[in-house]
Image (cartoon, rainbow, N blue to C red):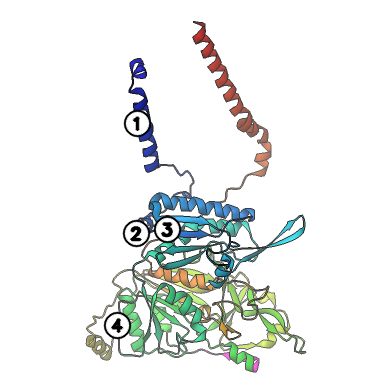
Amino acid sequence: MKKLFKSRLYLPVLLLVLFIINWAASQYHARIDLTSEKRFTLSNATKKVLKKIDEPVVIDIFLKGNLPSGFRQLAGTSNDMLQEFKEVAGNKIQFNFTSADDVMPGTDIKYADTLSAMGFYPINLTSQIKEGQQQQFVYPAAILHYKERLETVALYKGKTPLINFTDLNSAEALLEYNLVNAVAKITQKEKPVIGYATGNGEPPTGAYATYDLVENVLSKDYKLFTFDLGSPKFIPDAFSAMIIVKPTTGFSDEAKLKLDQYVMNGGKLLLFIDRLNAEMDSLKINNQVTALDRDLKLNDFLFNYGVRINADLIMDLQCDYLPFDVNGNGQFDLLPWNYFPVMDSKNNHPINKGLGFVAGKFVNSVDTVEAEDIQKTIILSSSSNARTLGSPAIISGAENVNAPEDAKYKKANIAAAVLLEGKFKSLFANRLSQTMKDSLNNYNISFLPVCLKNNKIIVVGDGDIVLNTVVKGNPIPMGMNAYTYGSQREFPFANTSFLQNCLDYLINENGLSEAKAKDYVVRLLDNKKTEEQKSFWQIITIAVPVAIVLLFAFIFQWLRKRKYAK
């Protein structure tokens, strides 16, 4: 060993060893995630998506600047998450943290203006400073760039205008899913094909009421085609999902056969159904409307799959607002309208995890019924202070003159949307007529009595939940209240996110629900135990490190004296 130290090769060998160690450290990384929920470990589905990226994805995160502590923590978690993405994807993932108040390069436009135009609603925060109160708009959002494409992500979806720890913790838990889902969408080679059903009185795709649904969701992330269920043709297998929105006329057996065989062949269904004909237009004219059953003739179809939409309306103390002339003097006040329930998600499924409030209008309750091998999951429900009003339901604008009798609102968690999963059996397994057989034969389609494989259907007891209203001639986002839109009382409901989550779960085969299912466990300190053991841990964290350094210095000096004393 002494000869090696004195050799001329010592320095080159040392430099070579150091180079090899540094190169290996830059190429290979390993760490141990000791958290029970695997907070710092990317899911396998996330890694698969990241490894498929062929060209760089640039991500701009708008969480920079003098932000409140909660959002600074969210920014730090976002940075850590994107660093993990880089570990897998290398230089194919690039990211920057930007302030929404910065000006876009080459323009005089602030990023905040662009984000607002994209539909991101800022969070209005008021903080106390020396000069008084300071108002600050925070945009917890991200924009992804890939080739010529653009994808946006909301990083925080609070349930209330007030910022709270629970919502921020939920936002951190959903970071991996939200970011990798956006990466998967922006890098996909082909957009999935969605069918929009017509022929039973559904609002057309070119109507004002479907503007947000079509332009900002379906046409943005999918290839959209309309399909007339009244035509002789059967639903093409190319449709990844078929969406039915607020039909108003009854379905024929032929139309139900097409939907049934589409499901048997693996097609996904997403139904937004109003069973009763309660409409605001009628209420505005007469100040009273009787909500009657539309007789859509879907009862046997849905019952066969394990669900029933009831001929009633959900009334909820947790509801949206409408203007009412309380004193009869022409001065309108915004009052709670119990027929417009604001539905809470119970975080019991990837579809509703961290979702926020969803606004409904004249919502029907949904019951699950016995269906062999079918799993049912309630994904939207009322608050704990609700009731149902059976048909024929008389709805009057005069109801809000007096406060509702809270004692009547005793029902909790009335189901409004249900996910069905399993191997569905055909409605026509034992009732296929000769006419139906001939129709199938004409298109060379073989009748299937049972699903080829496990499938999914989502049934929502509200057709208006994905439709939008119009303010001053312009359509506003689905779920938004036309009477509070643009005012200080405006609240960004999560209707759009709910629809997107439903479609993602039905269609996407990436398996990203694993990433969405993660929970960040909040581990709070025991105040009593902390106070009792405060001195002990102060000694451990402060005195012990200093003692170790002093001990090392003493041993070093002793060894040095001993060596030179000889």
91 up-or-down from 472: above or below = above
Q: Which tag, 2 or 3, sits closer to the chain's start? A: 2
Q: Which mark is residue 514?
A: 3
Residue type marked 1? Leu
Residue type marked 3? Glu
For numbered disc 1, what is the local secondary structure?
helix
Q: Which residue is mark 1?
A: 16
User: Over which residues does the magenta segment extend?
Assistant: 286-293
Q: Which mark is residue 185?
A: none
In front of the other: label 3 or label 4?
3
Q: Which residue is mark 2?
A: 54
Q: Which tag, 2 or 4, sits closer to the chain's start? A: 2
Q: Residue at x 61, y 74 (%)?
A: 386
C-alpha gap between disc 2 and disc 1: 34 Å
For numbered disc 4, what is the local secondary structure?
loop
Residue 33 spot, x, y in % from top left: 46, 44
Q: Which residue is mark 4?
A: 430
Q: Which tag, 4 or 1, sits closer to the chain's start? A: 1
Q: Which tag, 2 or 1, sits closer to the chain's start? A: 1
